[in-house]
Image: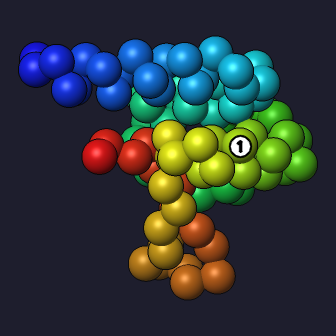
Amino acid sequence: MCCCTEQSYRDWESQLDDLTPSAKFVYTVLEYEGPLTQKTLAEETRLSQRSVRSALSDLTETGIVEERIYPADARQRLYAIDTE
């Protein structure tokens, strides 16, 4: 692992430390399950839609998670950990 990658990993860790437990939980589920919709995240985590929406908002604002168009249904969004 190069130093730039290690530094960016540490930056993500410090950003996660500042987030709510719900946001950390949503991040962990995305890390293990891969890209998911908001509805699926709510089902997987058993958090309320409101909690998932708030967690995703926090995660996307910090740049840890990215929002994509869900090809199967353009009305929904797919959320994934930003790998860049």
Question: Based on the displayed image, in which of its 4 quarters is residue 34 positioned?
Answer: top left
The image shows residue 69 at horizontal and vertical percentages of 49, 74
Residue 19 visible? The answer is yes
**Residue at x-position 55% and y-position 84%:** 74
Mark 1 Cα-neighbour bin, 10 Å: few <14, some 14–19, many ≥20? some
Q: Answer left or right for 12 relative to 42.
A: left
Q: Is residue 29 above or below residue 74?
A: above
Question: Based on the displayed image, in which of its 4 quarters is residue 39 positioned?
Answer: bottom right
Residue 41 visible? The answer is no
Question: Based on the displayed image, in which of its 4 quarters is residue 31 positioned?
Answer: top left
Q: Answer left or right for 14 relative to 52.
A: left
Of residues 4 and 1, the one nearer the viewer is 4
**Residue kind at label 1, given as amino acid type:** Asp
**Residue at x-position 29% and y-position 46%:** 84
Q: Answer left or right for 6 relative to 58.
A: left
The total of numbered circles placed on residues is: 1
The image shows residue 46 at horizontal and vertical percentages of 78, 33
Of residues 52 and 44, the one nearer the viewer is 52
**Residue at x-position 20% and y-position 26%:** 4
The image shows residue 60 at horizontal and vertical percentages of 60, 50
Of residues 68 and 72, the one nearer the viewer is 68
Quarter of the N terminus within the rendering: top left
**Residue at x-position 64% and y-position 50%:** 61
The image shows residue 22 at horizontal and vertical percentages of 76, 27
Q: Answer left or right for 65 relative to 20.
A: left
SS state under label 1: helix
* Residue that mark 1 sits on: 58
Q: Residue furthest bottom?
A: 74
Q: Residue furthest left?
A: 2
Q: Is residue 73 above or below residue 66?
A: below
Q: Please, which colouring scheme is shown? A: rainbow
